[in-house]
Image (tube, rainbow, N blue to C red):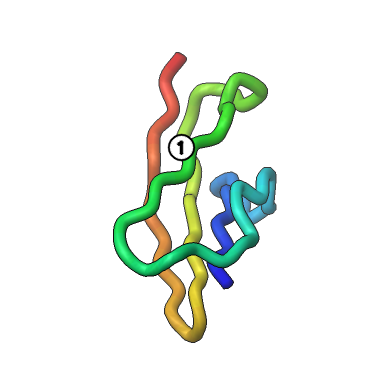
Amino acid sequence: MVNIKVYNLLGEEIAEISNQIFSSGINEVSFNASGFASGIYIVSLEANSIRLSQKIALMK
């Protein structure tokens, strides 16, 4: 199971992009950020016991 979430800088979850099983290999997920304000967000990916976080900048 792969879970991808977006958080604001206060640590509040603002979107869950994915919560599904992916096949092995390279996968791509897209989401509509039109409802988000410009700013810095944290994207968190969790799969099995691995958790990765990346800071992103959204500019409109």
Q: Which residue is mark 1?
A: 40
Q: At x 46% / y 14%, what residue is drawn?
A: 60
Q: At x 66% / y 50%, what residue is drawn?
A: 16
Q: Which residue type does callout 1 highlight?
A: Ile
Q: Residues within 10 Å of mark 1 (few under 14, many from 20)?
A: some
Q: At x 49% / y 37%, what residue is drawn?
A: 30
Q: Quadrant of the N terminus?
A: bottom right
- The local secondary structure at tag 1 comes to strand
Q: At x 31% / y 56%, what residue is drawn?
A: 26
Q: Where is residue 3, by image quadrant?
A: bottom right
Q: Is residue 26 left or right of residue 19?
A: left
Compare residues 53 and 17 and report the one nearer the observer: 17
Tally of numbered discs? 1
Point out the residue furthest to the left here: 26
Q: Is residue 20 left or right of residue 47?
A: right
Point out the residue furthest to the bottom here: 49
Q: Determine whether 40 is above or below 23 in the image.
A: above
Compare residues 59 and 16 and report the one nearer the observer: 16
Q: Residue 38, how many percent across, how many down?
A: 51, 23
Q: Residue 15, how many percent across, how many down?
A: 67, 45
Q: Where is residue 8, by image quadrant?
A: top right
Q: Determine whether 38 is above or below 48 in the image.
A: above
Q: Where is residue 19, by image quadrant?
A: bottom right
Q: Is residue 37 left or right of residue 22?
A: right
